[in-house]
Image (cartoon, coloured by chain):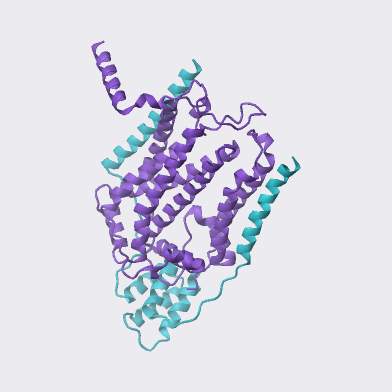
Chain colours: A cyan, B purple
């Protein structure tokens, strides 16, 4: 009986042990390597799109690009303009300029999927409601027949 | 009257050939409730995933250069592509959610107890396969989140050493790792899941559904297969079908009203996204201690689940007689939910040495 009462505690101890083993694992830092300017600009765009709070990381990347004398596949003038825009907190404009500096059309914030309701989707929505109602009606009937 | 005779004749003929009446064997009466139908509802979600997945497979190209483009084609132009993708997304959410609720019900009612320990382990394996399917699926959409998921996959392979060889891009030069994840997602994992599910169902048939834990405070575990009852397995299937119909209705509605999103085009070398909700708890551990924590935390969770029947050996089913184990696992569940919420609101961290 006493052993049975102890078992949940043993379980917790094992779980905690395994979790703490994980916590004890530290991971090493990354080695610094010279980055491709195009990749640095792409990273800045991604930072600004996905996590605007990482504006400092994006700016640091752009500074690194601007320190280069030449940068293939990147228009440094537009990167400079984007840096100015970023300094003014104009993130969408900066993203647009950076996209243009890479010679591509802006894909601001990725292709957000929107719902364009058309007749077919209305029919699908009505079907969805009917399916739910049919299921609920069937369960109700089963419940009634079970009580009789 | 004539119609009724014809109908009876038709069903008799059909039954004679496919044996529908064989499904009318007795099952405990509590099998008709929602709690005991969640496993079946999970299976129905899997069937929806297979059907919508086959449809999307006609338009998806699993090569890294074209994967995103083909997904954009599915969303914007492919016949019923928008609907199929969104239904696939919501069915994946539903499958994991109902599987977790099913496991919670089994845990709460002590249905894992002797002689059902092996079947509990089979259920844990099914959960692992389900999570594997969700992980591989989330990488296939090939946006920033998908790329970061794949990068985690590669780094975990390095942490695992020789065991993780298959997950590494260096496994072969002839097929990109994204394509191999696609193969895993559409063939290896679904086939494995189907085989393991067959074992799960076979064991339930052999042992019968677990007895009602709330029949009395002294209810004990035993085999119920062959015990007389007013309920039949066919009736249980009917209940599963009706609950699934409600679930399908909700999924179809959500597929139209709340479509699955697609993030920005992937950029290598940065970590700026957070994973899907089911990975958030271990993402927090990873934030704290790095990639190794992800592996160890996952292992700890699955080991904690696997040992349930071996630490709770008493024959009693009523929750009041199993307070210790229920409190222990309740705390574990709360810890995971807390870690998930914290991960959602806390800023992300880079783990991949990028």
State whether residue B151 is above or below residue B30. below
State whether residue B354 is above or below residue A33. above
Residue B94 picture location, percent across and down: 44, 44
- Relative placement, left or right, of A79 versus A15 is left
Q: Is residue A60 visible?
A: yes
Task: Write down the quadrant of residue B135 in the picture.
Answer: bottom left
Residue drawn at x 62%, y 45% is: B310
Q: Residue furthest top?
A: B1
**Count of number-bearing discs:** 0
Q: Residue furthest bottom?
A: A69
Q: Is residue B346 visible?
A: no
Task: Write down the quadrant of residue B6 in the picture.
Answer: top left
Residue B347 picture location, percent across and down: 54, 63
Residue drawn at x 40%, y 87% is: A68
- Relative placement, left or right, of B219 versus B344 is right
Q: Residue furthest right?
A: A2
State which quarter of the image contains the N terminus of chain B: top left
Nearest the viewer among B17 and B262 is: B17
Task: Write down the quadrant of residue B222 in the picture.
Answer: top right
Residue B332 picture location, percent across and down: 62, 50
Nearest the viewer among A125 and A24 is: A24
State whether residue A129 is above or below residue A23. above
Residue B75 picture location, percent across and down: 30, 53
Residue drawn at x 57%, y 39% is: B112
């Amino acid at each position: 009986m006493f052993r049975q009462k102890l078992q949940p505690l043993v379980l917790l101890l094992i779980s905690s042990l395994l979790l703490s083993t994980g916590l004890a694992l530290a991971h090493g830092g990354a080695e610094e390597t010279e980055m491709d300017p195009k990749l640095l600009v792409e990273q800045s765009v991604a930072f600004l799109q996905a996590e605007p709070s990482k504006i400092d990381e994006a700016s640091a990347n752009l500074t690194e690009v601007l320190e280069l004398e030449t940068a293939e596949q990147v228009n440094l003038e537009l990167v400079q303009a984007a840096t100015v825009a970023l300094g003014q907190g104009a993130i969408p404009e900066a993203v647009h300029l950076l996209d243009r500096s890479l010679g591509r059309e802006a894909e601001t914030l990725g292709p957000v999927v929107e719902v364009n309701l058309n007749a077919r989707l209305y029919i699908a929505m009505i079907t969805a409601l009917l399916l739910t109602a049919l299921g609920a009606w069937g369960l109700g009937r089963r419940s009634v027949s079970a009580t009789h | 009257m004539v119609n009724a005779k014809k109908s009876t004749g038709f069903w008799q003929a059909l039954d004679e050939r496919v044996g529908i009446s064989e499904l009318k064997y007795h099952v405990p009466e509590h099998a008709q409730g929602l709690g005991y139908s969640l496993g079946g509802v999970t299976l129905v979600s899997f069937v929806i995933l297979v059907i919508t997945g086959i449809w999307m497979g006609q338009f998806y190209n699993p090569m890294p250069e074209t994967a995103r483009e083909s997904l954009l084609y599915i969303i914007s132009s492919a016949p019923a592509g928008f609907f199929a993708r969104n239904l696939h997304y919501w069915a994946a959410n539903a499958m994991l959610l109902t599987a977790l609720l099913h496991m919670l019900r089994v845990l709460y009612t002590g249905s894992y107890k002797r002689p059902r320990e092996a079947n509990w382990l089979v259920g844990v394996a099914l959960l692992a396969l389900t999570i594997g399917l969700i992980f591989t699926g989330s990488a296939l959409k090939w946006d920033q989140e998908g790329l970061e998921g794949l990068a985690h996959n590669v780094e975990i392979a390095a942490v695992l050493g020789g065991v993780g060889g298959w997950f590494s891009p260096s496994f072969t030069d002839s097929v990109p790792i994204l394509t191999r994840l696609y193969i895993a997602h559409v063939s290896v994992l679904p086939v494995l899941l189907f085989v393991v599910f067959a074992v799960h169902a076979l064991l339930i048939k052999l042992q019968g559904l677990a007895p009602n834990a709330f029949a009395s405070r002294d209810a004990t575990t035993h085999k119920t297969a062959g015990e007389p009852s007013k309920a039949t397995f066919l009736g249980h299937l009917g209940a599963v079908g009706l609950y699934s119909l409600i679930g399908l209705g909700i999924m179809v509605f959500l597929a139209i009203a709340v479509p699955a999103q697609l993030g920005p085009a992937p950029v290598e070398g940065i970590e700026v996204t957070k994973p899907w909700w089911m990975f958030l708890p271990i993402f927090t551990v990873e934030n704290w201690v790095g990639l190794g924590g992800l592996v160890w935390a996952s292992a700890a969770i699955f080991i904690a689940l696997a040992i349930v029947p071996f630490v709770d050996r008493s024959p009693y089913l009523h929750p009041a007689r199993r307070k210790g184990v229920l409190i222990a696992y309740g705390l574990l569940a709360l810890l995971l939910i807390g870690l998930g919420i914290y991960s959602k609101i806390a800023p992300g961290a880079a783990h991949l040495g990028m």
